[in-house]
Image: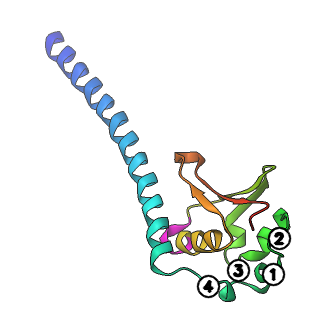
Amino acid sequence: MSLERERLEKLIEKIDDLLVVLNSVAEDLRTVSTSLKSIAVSQIAPTPISALPAPAREVEAGKEVSVGDVKKVFPEDLEPLLNFEDKGEYIMIKPRQFLGSENFARIASIIREVGGEYISAGKESHFRIPKKKF
């Protein structure tokens, strides 16, 4: 019986190793999927600046923006889903929760419209808006 038990333990170890690899691959696929969605949305239906909330249109081009200026760009239903942080040269925007594809696409469109970009970095993925290119 001990030989059979050893075989079972080795099999369980191999299954555990496979699960670690599969989880890593799944995380990479989620990151790639998010990036592709962001790119696809920008090519399909960019938000015209006239469709952005009035505060976004009122910020002077070339003026250094604050976190408050960036928050004003987002509609009331999206802003609570996001954390905003001043990182010196840019404003970093990270989701507080899972956004879903529709909210992600809306946010990505607004970010691109004001000169920002999406940084795909696994769990550290975020949006970034340069403070001087707003």
Position of residue 2 measured from the top left corner of the image (x, y, whole percent): 18, 10
Q: What is the CA distance from the residue labelled 1 to the residue labelled 2?
A: 8 Å
Quadrant of the rendered structure where residue 92 is? Answer: bottom right
The reply to whether the magenta stretch includes residue 67 is: no
Question: Mark on residue 55?
Answer: 1
Q: Amino acid at mark 1?
A: Pro
> Which of the two discs, 4 and 3, labels the residue nearer the N terminus?
4
Position of residue 88 measured from the top left corner of the image (x, y, whole percent): 81, 49
On the image, numbered disc 2 is attached to which residue? 69
Q: Amino acid at mark 3?
A: Pro
> Which of the two discs, 3 and 1, labels the residue nearer the N terminus?
1
- Horizontal side of 115 relative to 60 (left or right) equals left
Q: What is the CA distance from the residue labelled 4 to the residue labelled 3?
A: 15 Å
The reply to whether the magenta stretch includes residue 102 is: yes
> Which of the two discs, 1 and 4, labels the residue nearer the N terminus?
4
Viewer-nearest of discs 1 and 4: 4
Q: Residue at x 58, y 51 (%)?
A: 125
Quadrant of image for the C terminus: bottom right
The range drawn in magenta is 99-103
Question: Looking at this rendering, what residue extends furthest in the front direction?
Answer: 62
Question: Mark on residue 75?
Answer: 3
Is the residue under label 2 in contact with that under label 1 (CB below 8 Å)? yes
Is the residue under label 3 in contact with that under label 2 (CB below 8 Å)? no
**Structural crowding at the residue carrying mark 2, measured as other residues with C-alpha within 10 Å and reported as few (<14), some (14–19) or many (≥20):** some
On the image, numbered disc 4 is attached to which residue? 48
Q: Amino acid at mark 2?
A: Asp
